[in-house]
Each structure stands twice: as C-alpha cells, then as structure tokens.
Image: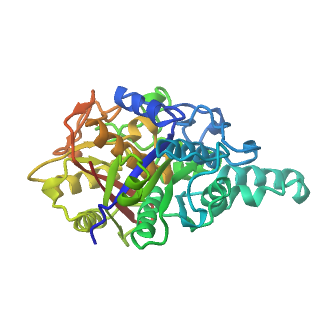
Amino acid sequence: MATDRIVVTGTGLVTAAGGDADSTWRTLCEGRGTARHDPGLDGGPGGPAPISCRPPHPEDAPVRQGWRLDRSTRYLLTAAREALREAGIAAFGERDPDWEPERVAVVIGSAAGGVAVLEHAHRRLLERGPGALSPLTLTGYLPNLSAAAHLALALRTTGPALHTSTACASGATAIAHAALLLATGACDLAVAGGTDAMATPLCAAAFARTGALSRRTDRPATASRPFDRDRDGFVLGEGAGVLVLERAADAAARRAPALAHLAGWAATSDAHHPTAPAPDGRGLRRAVALALRAADAAPGEVEHVNAHGTGTPQGDRVEAAAIRDLYARTPPSVTSAKGALGHTMGAAGAIEAALTVRTLRTGTVPPTANHDAPDPGTAGIDLVTGTPRHHGPRLALSHSLGFGGHNAVLVLRR
C-alpha cells in the first residue's frame, strides 16, 4: 500500500544538545559529542562508565507540577509542544486546539517507561518501608502512563492513546503505528514519537554487564564512535522526539506545512538472539525491502540513510554490511546521530526520524561525530564525517534496531 499521502507537519526534539530541534541540529552539524561525566552513575570500582548524554534542563515541562513526572515524561511533553507549534496547533493551555479531540491519536514509544521513578521508589521501599512510597509511583513509572497517557491527558485528546515498546526501535515503531491509524481512517491527526530516560544506576549497570557500553571515561565527549575503528560501545543518552502526522489533504486544508512525506514503513524480527543482531542482517534487509515496496520505491532511489549506528562493534558491522549490499550500485550518504547524542534508547527512532526530515528540508546531512578512522569491517559505505554534506537528498531511510531482534524502517520523501 502506498503511503505517501501522509505528511509530517511538525517535529520537536529534546536531546543532550538542547531542548529543541534547532539547538540539536546545530550541534549535530558541528559534529560535536555531548557526553560528559554523570555523577549519578559513578558507582565506584566495577560499575559502569559514569558518562552519559542527558538533556540540560529536564525540569522544564509545559504542565502544572511537572516536577512530579519522570524526566522521560517531561522530555516528551516539551518535544510535543514544539512539534505542535511547528504544525500550527496551539496546545498545553495556550488556547484550545482547533481539532476534534476524539480524532487525534497519541502513539509514543519507550523502552523502559519511567524507570528513574521506579528505581527511586525501590530504594525508598528498601530503606524506609512501604509507607514511604509516593502514591504517584505507579503513575510515574508505568510505561503507558509515563508516555502516551500523560501526553494525552495534557492535550485532552480522546482518540487512541497507545504505547509501543520494541526496545531501541520503539520510537520508529510508534510512528509507523500512527501512520497506520491515519491510513485506515481511525484518526485525522497523530502525535507520535518516543522518549526515554535510562541513564540511571540500574540501567547503566545492566547495560555494562552485557558489554554494550563504552568505557572511555577519560574523554567522554569522544566516547560514542559509530562505525569508527576504535569504537567500544555506546553511551547512554536521554531525550525525546515527536512528529505530528496528518493526511496530506487534511494538512493542506488547514494550510499546515508539509515538511516531508512519510512514504513507507516496515517492521521485522530477527528471531536470532536476545541482544545480538542476526550476523547476516536479514531482519534489517527485509525491513528495508518491505518499506521501499510500501513506498513504491527502489533501492537505487535511496539517497540518504540515517543509520542506527550505535557504536557497538558487532551492531555497526552488521548494519554497514546491509547498507553496502542493499545499495551497491548507488551508495547513499550515511550518518549516525549517536556520535553526538548518545543512544537515547526508545526515543532514538523518533529523534532520528525528525533529523531525517530536517535533512530532507535543508538538503544537509550532518556528520557522524567522533569518526576518526575507518574500520575494514564497516568500509564501503558513504559515511559523512568531519563536516556536513550538502547534496539535497529526495528520498531517505531511517533505520532503527532493538534488543530482541526488532527492526523498524521509515521511508521519507522530500
């Protein structure tokens, strides 16, 4: 089914590079890493590397008593406000939005929900007993509440409010589900994306035990090194990305900006291993093929790929091989935002989709931060490094992969 009748009319971002899309984009184009020492992760000898990529002002949130919410929820509400403003929709009490609440869908992905709230509550339980728990514990950490439900409450929308959880593909999965709701007529407008705040002691220690995290504590800003010869794992990042999606005719009727067309999407599963991707990249390859078929496009038309590119030795190698083989005749430009922003987990797919929209709008591909030396295992892809590249791609893909073998691919057209 062709899906290019669905357009993106707004984007919003909260990342370690700043609290909005413009500041994030500037940092990406500078090719500058944002990781720094994180005292909250400094657990002593044997613990994870105490570095992370956290947004600078997590306390900001466009709702009353936002301080009560998990920081992943605060990121989400801030990103959603920016996306809706760009789409020409006032919300969060600025004035009543000009929409039918029951025709608006909210679809948000996260890998862990309000995990910082849960960790804090567990410490209080162990130290002071059940009576010390806040009555807001459940509403702070339950994944559906910390993401989609709190956003729907803030917007007062009464259409579908759905939470997706496909690990690090969650944000992209949410955007695909929102597009399906629009394509089937279940809603007229969708606020979709992802959020996560997993730079917590428990999550960092758990990832460290899998061997997934970088151990570069001496120069944190250069620790995340997607596709680089000296990569040794990812850096935990936090943030949120939100897209406003509409059918093209509806957007045109209200004179909303059509920033890009969401032309196709697909999701597959490797069924290979709980944490490692299939060595032949079969799940990603099939997701790309299905997404391009949905978009009525051929591999030769792909001019840019926003890669998953986490900086793990095996993951980057598998993804690079898939990109090299899928687009052998006409290699697209490739970039990874994780060198600058760290791995924002369930938010990554949504953040990277918003960045792909910006690439299509501006004709500019940001460089992959911290890529100094090519790796023979990831050679053969046209990786943008050093400085931005201005080549005006018209068709771009955003890859998202997650633990459990989840693959999600979004196709975007200018």
Q: Measured from the top left, where is residue 129 in percent x and y?
A: 89, 56
Tell me where residue 361 sits by quadrant: top left
Task: Classify residue 384 as left or right of residue 276.
Answer: left
Q: Which residue is drawn at 66% across and 41% down?
A: 61
Q: Which colour scheme is used?
A: rainbow
Q: Residue at x 16, y 45 (%)?
A: 380
Task: Classify residue 229 as left or right of residue 234.
Answer: left
Locate the N terminus by quadrant: bottom left
Closer to us: 359 or 187: 187
Q: Measured from the top left, where is residue 223 in percent x and y?
A: 43, 34
Closer to us: 140 or 228: 140
- Up-down: is 258 above or below 224? below
Q: Residue at x 66, y 36 (%)?
A: 60
Closer to us: 378 or 241: 241
Task: Give the residue furthest to the front.
Answer: 253
- Up-down: is 364 above or below 68? above
Q: Measured from the top left, where is residue 305 in percent x and y?
A: 26, 48
Asked whether the viewer can see residue 315, the reply is yes
* Total numbered labels: 0
Q: Which residue is drawn at 19% across and 45% down?
A: 381
Task: Give the residue furthest to the left.
Answer: 329
